[in-house]
Image (cartoon, rainbow, N blue to C red):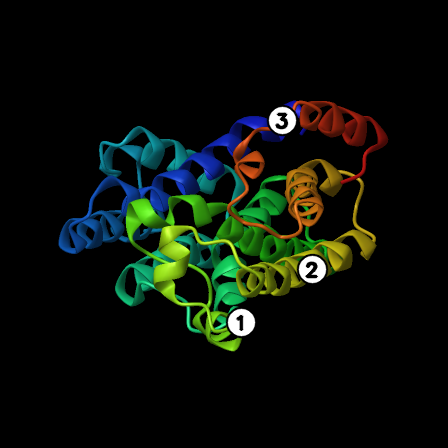
Amino acid sequence: MTKTIRSPALVVRAFNVEVARVQDQTSDSQTAAFRVQFWLDTINYIYKKDQTISKIPANPIAKELFKVCKSYSLPRRHLEKLVSSRSNLLKSKYFKTLEDIERYADDTVSSVYYLLLSVAGITDIHADHAASHLGKSQGLTNILRSIHVSNYHKIVALPMDVLMKYQVSQEEVLRGVDSEKMRNVAFEIASRANNHLKKARQIKVPPITNQIFLPAIAVDSYLTKLQKNNFNLFDKSLQCSSTILPFKFYYKRILNKY
């Protein structure tokens, strides 16, 4: 990512991480709701007419976000989606269908890419289309990767319709039971993620966009490793970081591809 957009991009990602951490910071639903509301209120403050930084809440990320929003005219709707989608998940606790996860991924991951495209000054329908597919692929992959912490949070993020299709109970997921039917669940979700990744890569986008979409390499790496492990989500090797991944990032960056 070029130096000119690196700093504002970090602010956007920091904001996303801060909102995403809400459910990890407390087990109390009311406290979590208050924290989500804080960020919704912050967005309202940021987009008030003739707003000044002195009136933004005394939070370093909030103040930096204000500067970026004013300097790059970031679309308000994408920031709101990042927050409201997390708020909705806190209430529902689970996903009914695979399509629900895709919508959630579009709101929480694709929205980050839309914001980064805005920071880079890219207004291109093809770039937006690729961002949508990549966000869905990354979101679905994140759901698969989070399986090893399901027991800690006592929440199963896998879609209920796919679990029911292969007759896998939530208890089996929480206990980390590997089975043929559990691998079928992983295969179906991973296949959907891979399809979105392929579609994203097939779309011709402006050259600078390739730098923004580099996280696709990590998504591809995980899905490939999962396939090599015969879609066993509980294989401990999936939790280990790849030693060659940094080289893949460097190589793709040199080629200006993702």
Q: Is residue 28 among the parts visible in the rendering?
A: yes
Determine the secondary structure under disc 3. helix
Q: Amino acid at mark 3?
A: Thr
CB of mark 1 within 8 Å of CB of mark 3?
Answer: no
Q: Quadrant of the N terminus?
A: top right
Residue highlighted by disc 2: 196
Task: Look at discs 3 and 2 and give the one toward the viewer.
Answer: 2
Q: Earlier in the sequence, mark 2 or mark 1?
A: 1
Q: What residue sits 42% from the left and 50% below the top? A: 176
Most foreground residue, 108 or 40: 108
20 left or right of 72 in image: left
Of the residues under marks 1 and 3, which one precedes in the sequence? 3
Q: Which residue is mark 1?
A: 99
Q: Is residue 110 visible?
A: no
Q: Nearer the viewer, mark 1 or mark 3?
A: 1
Cα distance between the residues tagged 1 and 3: 36 Å
198 in relation to 239, above or below: below
Label number found at residue 231: none
**Whole-percent x, y for residue 28 in the image:** 15, 50
Q: Eyeballing the image, is 20 above or below 135? A: above
